[in-house]
Image (spheres, rainbow, N blue to C red):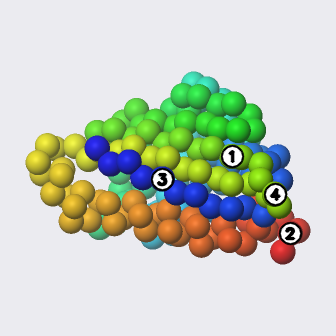
Amino acid sequence: MRTLVFKQFLPVTLSEAWNFFSNPANLGRITPPAMNFIIRSEVPAKIYPGLIILYRVSPVFGIPVKWVTEITHAEEPFFFIDEQRSGPYAIWHHEHRFEEVAGGVMMTDKLFYKVPFGIFGVVADWLFVHRKVLSIFTYRTKVLTNPSVIAPGQK
């Protein structure tokens, strides 16, 4: 199983960060366009524990995959956790944490994931899955360097 940690400073308030990241509709704004990310279920403006979200995404070779996640924990405005219930991973556990710091918010993403299919999954992870996951978070980091993405009107 892989464990990845990503940290990013966001020059916004804790409330602005929470309002953006706790709205499932915003996930598409920070996902690479080539992944063809689409939410397939009705979603509220704010997450809550027990929320199930259905997606379609094309993570590899443009092949569409159904993905179902559940928000298992949420403590406004500090953290939430989403876990895959069905989809391309054997395990997907993603913690989102927000900490108020001088001048903004430190966002920490902690991801635990495992590719299925035993040794074949290990090889696939080594060949391309790990790089794909890193590229998704690299894209998010790039998009989120513009504070107006999270808090319109900021520069």
- Residue position for label 4: 102
Task: Please state which of the two labelled residues, at mark 4 or mark 3, is closer to the viewer.
Answer: 4
Q: Amino acid at mark 1?
A: Phe
Per the image, label 3 sits on a secondary structure element best described as strand
Per the image, label 2 sits on a secondary structure element best described as loop
The first of marks 4 and 3 along the sequence is 3
Residue 23 position within the rendered picture, expressed as x and y whole percent measured from the top left: 69, 45
Residue at mark 4 to residue at mark 3: CA–CA distance: 21 Å
* Residue occupying the far right of the picture: 153
At label 4, counting other C-alpha atoms closer than 10 Å, the crowd grade (few under 14, some 14-19, many 20 or more) is few
- Asked whether the beta carbons under mark 3 and mark 2 sit within 8 Å of each other, the answer is no
The first of marks 2 and 1 along the sequence is 1
Residue 19 position within the rendered picture, expressed as x and y whole percent measured from the top left: 77, 46
User: For residue 12, which numbered disc appears in the image?
Assistant: none
Q: Amino acid at mark 2?
A: Gln
- Residue position for label 3: 5
User: For residue 98, which numbered disc appears in the image?
Assistant: 1
Task: Please state which of the two labelled residues, at mark 4 or mark 2, is closer to the viewer.
Answer: 4
Which image quarter is the C terminus in?
A: bottom right
Judged left or right of residue 5, residue 146 is right
The first of marks 3 and 1 along the sequence is 3
The first of marks 4 and 2 along the sequence is 4
Residue at mark 2 to residue at mark 1: CA–CA distance: 19 Å
Task: Please state which of the two labelled residues, at mark 2 or mark 1, is closer to the viewer.
Answer: 1
Judged left or right of residue 25, residue 137 is left
Front-lying residue, 149 or 145: 145
- Asked whether the beta carbons under mark 4 and mark 3 sit within 8 Å of each other, the answer is no
Judged left or right of residue 15, residue 43 is left
Q: Amino acid at mark 4?
A: Ala
The first of marks 3 and 2 along the sequence is 3
